[in-house]
């Protein structure tokens, strides 16, 4: 069995190398060059496509640049974190979501049967498809490009006057001594208000953000109740965070909690 898997993995590796060399090719041409059947090449193409390593079209494929592959892998990691965050949302919850990509993605994965109110300063929510039972409330405020973050006194006042069950937040960095940090000073007050006005804080950051610190502090490490990050996170950092009473949830690229 292992020998058979090795043969398949080698064939798929050779196929990926060939596609990257040719940039674009038909399925028939690839099958001929690798001396395999068309059904076999289709299965291998499907496998590489599902791994986001190539683009698959009707009858042909094209290569993906290394930058695109890295971006795709990063987005997949963030979406797996967002999926887990969505499972922590209960029926009738009022949720704060800040301007981070990962936190806003959690809206897509909320169980359709749940009634949830989402209060967010993320203007990108306007382009998302949401379910009828999810009420979206924008904080208002001044729009900050390129993230479409809503900030300023208007947004801040609307958050301060609300009590939420949970805050699902992203961050530029999460450092053991510096805490939750952001690269944008205008978002600090918004993040702090969400933390203060939520009963539970769920921080959603990919593993590259751990023990990284940006310029501006939004919250203390002790403000975080639950951390959701990738399973490739440094075990020593995770163990250190647990000492602060933080529940750490690690999720792999397939969405499996470790």
Image (cartoon, rainbow, N blue to C red):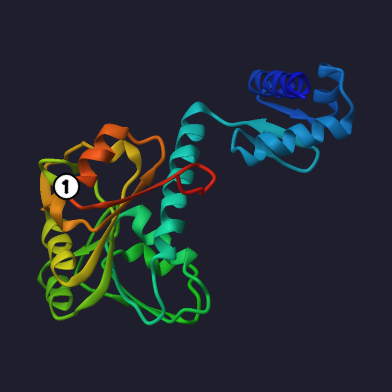
Q: Nearer the viewer, residue 238 or 113?
A: 238
Place of residue 234 in the rendered image (x, y in percent of width and height, measured from the top left): 31, 32
Question: Circle 1 sits in a helix, a strand or a loop, which is it?
Answer: strand
Q: Is residue 49 left or right of residue 1?
A: left
Crowd band around label 1 with a 10 angstrom C-alpha radius: few (<14), some (14–19), many (20+): many
Q: Residue at x 24, y 52 (%)?
A: 246
Residue 110 located left or right of residue 227: right
Residue 252 lies, with reference to residue 5, above or below; the image says below
State whether residue 255 is above or below residue 211.
below
Q: Which residue is under mark 1?
A: 181
* Side of 223 relative to 252 (left or right): left
The quarter of the rendered structure image containing the C terminus is: top left
Q: Position of residue 196 (x, y in %)?
A: 13, 67
The residue shown at (51%, 48%) is 256
Point 26% across, 32% down: residue = 236
Q: Residue at x 79, y 36 (%)?
A: 43
């Amino acid at each position: 069995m292992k020998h058979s898997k090795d043969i398949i993995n080698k064939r798929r590796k050779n196929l990926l190398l060939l596609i990257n060399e040719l940039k674009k090719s038909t399925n028939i041409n690839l099958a001929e060059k690798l001396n395999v059947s068309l059904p076999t090449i289709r299965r291998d193409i499907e496998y590489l496509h599902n791994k986001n390593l190539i683009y698959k079209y009707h009858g042909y494929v094209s290569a993906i640049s290394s930058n695109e592959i890295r971006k795709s892998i990063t987005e997949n990691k963030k979406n797996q974190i967002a999926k887990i965050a969505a499972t922590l949302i209960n029926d009738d919850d009022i949720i704060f979501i800040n301007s981070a990509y990962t936190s806003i993605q959690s809206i897509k994965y909320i169980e359709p049967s749940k009634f949830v109110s989402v209060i967010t300063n993320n203007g990108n929510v306007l382009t998302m498809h949401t379910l009828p039972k999810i009420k979206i409330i924008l904080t208002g405020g001044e729009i900050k490009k390129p993230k479409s973050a809503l900030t300023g006194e208007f947004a801040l006042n609307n958050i301060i006057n609300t009590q939420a069950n949970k805050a699902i937040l992203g961050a530029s960095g999460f450092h053991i001594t510096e805490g939750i940090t952001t690269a944008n000073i205008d978002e600090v007050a918004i993040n702090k208000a969400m933390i203060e006005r939520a009963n539970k804080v769920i921080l959603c950051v990919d593993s590259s953000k751990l023990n990284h610190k940006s310029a501006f502090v939004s919250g203390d490490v002790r403000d975080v109740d639950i951390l959701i990050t990738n399973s490739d996170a440094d075990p020593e950092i995770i163990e250190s965070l647990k000492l602060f009473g933080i529940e750490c949830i690690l999720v792999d690229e397939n969405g499996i909690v470790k």
